[in-house]
Amino acid sequence: MKTNGILKEEYLQRYAEVLIWGLKTARTGRYKKGDIILIQYDRAAQRLAEILYEKILQMRMHPVQRVNLSTDMERSFFGQADDRQLVFQPPGEKEFYNNLHGRIYLHAPDSLTHLKAVDSARIGRALVARKKLRDILDSREQKGRYGWTLCTLPTEELALQARTTLGVYTKQIVRACYLDEEDPVSRWREIRRSASVIKKWLTGLKVDRFHIESPHCDLWITPGEQRQWIGISGHNIPSFELFISPDWRGTNGIYYANLPSYRSGNYVEGVRLAFDNGEVTGIDAETGKDFTLRQLAMDKGAKRVGEFSLTDKRFSRINRFMADTLFDENFGGKYGNCHIAVGASYTDTFAGDQTAMNPALKRKLGFNESALHWDLVNTEPKTVTAYLKNGQKTIIYENGIFNH
């Protein structure tokens, strides 16, 4: 079947089925009749939102739809809002989040650069203000009361910024999400089963630290105590990465992101970070250095690692830059990819009782806290070696494949 740059109805129906699977899989608790599900979407994703709205009604749950701010609205907000307006939260928002059971986010931007002229500190203030709402959802998720998933739909803007045609961009989304198969949900279940074996193996290794080596990376990561590898959990469609949130205090060496990224309207390329005992002590970038400096000054945790991730190229059919972190952090290609995220940790990589997680335990175990979470991707050929607590070492990842 040919694609012409716009997802056909058949693909949208399959996409919706995969997203429903992702939503159910991502939540540790079970959904039931009467649950509240937020469908949040860009205008270009309206048709997929309509399909999901109907499916959620058929599941006897309550869909709530929210259209994201348009490009002009976002530009107006960050350009015109005063200090109080930047951090304003509408009445009832906290109550809504405290009663939300699921969220599906449909990303289909008509601009990636419209906030380029905005002072990133203003964007940072708005993000910090909304962190309290994110904390509510994190807490609900830890208790099995909330789950989420998201996806991207092709737009002219995404194709333009990825330096390709809309047809090529659309085809990559179709292939990446297995929408070209009659039953993509079955394929996702199969991938998840295969990944579960690898995650169990990785979690079972008694690792003191990891060494990541590539032409431009020489980085040491300390996984920390009571960690488990997670991934392909339904949260992101597509998602092929396996990751942990390490003990940020044990990060040392050099990390280089050769894949570009767009963030808050800014194009950033060639980020190079130097770590010393967990903190970034040196920052450089071939493009967007000033923006990178401001992002990593957002708060105290912005200069620390919140995530370490690896993608096996046997799972991922993504083989080009997509100007969208959802796809770029799952790059397969010739050598797979690794990425780190500076900023917030994921506490669901805690191997203990999730309901026991609290701020004091997070600090003790070295889970990082920040309003920032910025994925920086390296697709170079690399070797990742695990140095075990018994003094031995083993290569866990090489040439884009887990050695298991």
Image (cartoon, rainbow, N blue to C red):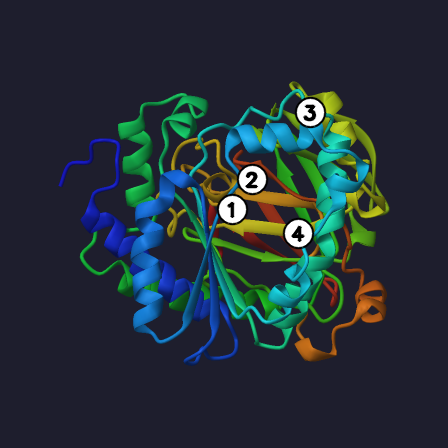
Q: Is residue 285 above or below residue 376?
A: above
> Tag 3: residue type?
Val
Q: Residues within 10 Å of mark 3 (few under 14, many from 20)?
A: some
Q: Residues within 10 Å of mark 4 (few under 14, many from 20)?
A: many
Q: Nearer the viewer, mark 4 or mark 3?
A: 3
Task: Determine whether, in the image, residue 298 is placed left or right of residue 326.
Answer: right
Residue 34's x, y, as percent? 44, 78
Q: Earlier in the sequence, mark 4 or mark 1?
A: 4
Q: Residue at x 81, y 47 (%)?
A: 301
Find disc 2 in the rendering and name its residue: 382
> Tag 2: residue type?
Lys
Find disc 3 in the rendering and name its residue: 118
Query: Nearest the camera: 208 or 251?
Result: 251
Q: Residues within 10 Å of mark 1 (few under 14, many from 20)?
A: some
Find disc 4 in the rendering and name its residue: 307
Numbered disc 1: secondary structure: strand
Q: Quadrant of residue 170?
A: top left
The CA distance from mark 1 to mark 2 is 6 Å
Q: Earlier in the sequence, mark 3 or mark 2?
A: 3
Cβ–Cβ below 8 Å for labels 1 and 2? yes
Q: Residue at x 32, y 37 (%)?
A: 172
